[in-house]
Image (cartoon, rainbow, N blue to C red):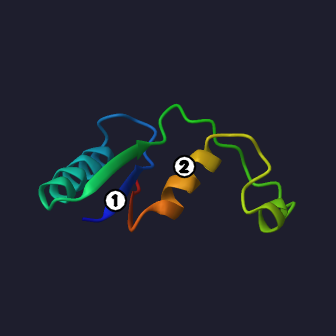
Amino acid sequence: MKKVIVISTSLRHGSNSDMLADKFVEGAKAAGNEVEKISLVGKNIQFCKGCFGCQKLGRCVINDDVNDIMAKVLEADVVCWADR
């Protein structure tokens, strides 16, 4: 069993890429994997400031939702990005 993260980057629920992400989740679960879908809808995501703090700290210095998402990505065996 693998730990799978599916990230839907669409900013609309029910978009084509969001539905594609849901189908990927279904298939990955049916194959016996542990799956989590993360939607970026409503997430607080700021732009990079180019400060290179991430290289020193191992995480972004901006306190937004990206740090939590990236922690899950780094723990996953498989990451699927459903992009629009």
Q: Which residue sits furthest right?
A: 51
Question: What's the mark number on residue 4?
Answer: 1
Residue located at (54% from left, 49% from top): 69
Q: Which residue is mark 2?
A: 69
Left or right: residue 21 compared with residue 57: left
Q: Secondary structure at mark 1?
A: strand
* Figure label count: 2
Q: Position of residue 65 (x, y in %)?
A: 61, 41
Viewer-closest of 67 and 2: 2
Question: What's the mark number on residue 83?
Answer: none
- The crowding category of the residue bearing disc 2, from other C-alpha atoms within 10 Å (few below 14, some 14 to 19, many at least 20), is some
Left or right: residue 39 compared with residue 49: left
Q: Earlier in the sequence, mark 1 or mark 2?
A: 1
Q: Amino acid at mark 2?
A: Ile
Quadrant containing the N terminus in the rendered view: bottom left
Residue 24, above or below 55: above
Viewer-closest of 10 and 42: 42
Q: Amino acid at mark 1?
A: Val
Residue located at (73% from left, 63% from top): 58
- The crowding category of the residue bearing disc 1, from other C-alpha atoms within 10 Å (few below 14, some 14 to 19, many at least 20), is many
Viewer-closest of 12 and 63: 63
Q: Secondary structure at mark 2?
A: helix
Residue located at (68% from left, 40% from top): 64
